[in-house]
């Protein structure tokens, strides 16, 4: 079975996706209406929550296998849950799944927008290094 996943945070990085699932699945620029992406207190990665009128940019990965999705589930922290959404990609609405912060963990949001380019410049290499160490264990 093939899955689609909207990535708005660290998983936008093709290098990280390659490190996690062993390839970079087909991807498209996409946006998710009515959701907002915020920095999380104490973490280098963001969280997503429903917020009418907001929109979050990211990428839509298509053609993910069930095993690959299981790897991504294991990568995400326990305060995320994967849920179905409709994203806009290539001018059309498409069904996908996305990792959002569970309501009981909304206290993690610090209210600042999360910046992907800042993450790439400051933390991506550390994420890749940690992933390489875990793979070697």
Image (spheres, helix red, strand yellow):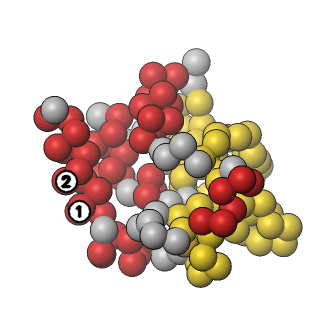
Task: Please tell me whether residue 112 is drawn above or below residue 97 in the rendered image.
Answer: below
Q: Residue at x 50, y 60 (%)?
A: 9
Disc 2 secondary structure class: helix
Which residue is farthest left?
136
Q: Quadrant of the C terminus?
A: top left
Kindly identify which residue carries mark 1.
Answer: 125
Q: Quadrant of the N terminus?
A: top right
Q: Position of residue 125 (x, y in %)?
A: 23, 62
- Residue contact between numbered discs 2 and 1, judged by CB atoms under 8 Å: yes
Q: Nearer the viewer, residue 88 or 122?
A: 122
Would you say 30 lies left or right of 76 here? Answer: right
Which residue is farthest right?
52
Would you say 71 lies left or right of 130 here? Answer: right
Kindly identify which residue carries mark 2.
Answer: 129
Q: Nearer the viewer, residue 126 or 32?
A: 126
Which image quadrant for residue 3? top right
């Amino acid at each position: 079975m093939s899955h689609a996943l909207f990535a708005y945070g660290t998983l936008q990085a093709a290098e990280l996706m390659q490190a996690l699932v062993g390839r970079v699945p087909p991807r498209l620029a996409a946006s998710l209406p009515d959701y907002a992406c915020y920095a999380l207190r104490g973490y280098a990665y963001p969280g997503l929550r429903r917020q009418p009128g907001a929109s979050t940019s990211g990428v839509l990965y298509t053609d993910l296998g069930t095993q690959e999705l299981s790897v991504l589930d294991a990568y995400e922290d326990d305060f995320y849950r994967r849920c179905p959404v409709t994203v806009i990609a290539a001018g059309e609405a498409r069904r996908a799944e996305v990792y959002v912060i569970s309501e009981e963990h909304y206290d993690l949001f610090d209210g600042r927008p999360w910046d992907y380019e800042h993450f790439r410049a400051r933390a991506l290499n550390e994420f890749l290094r940690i992933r390489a160490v875990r793979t070697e264990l």
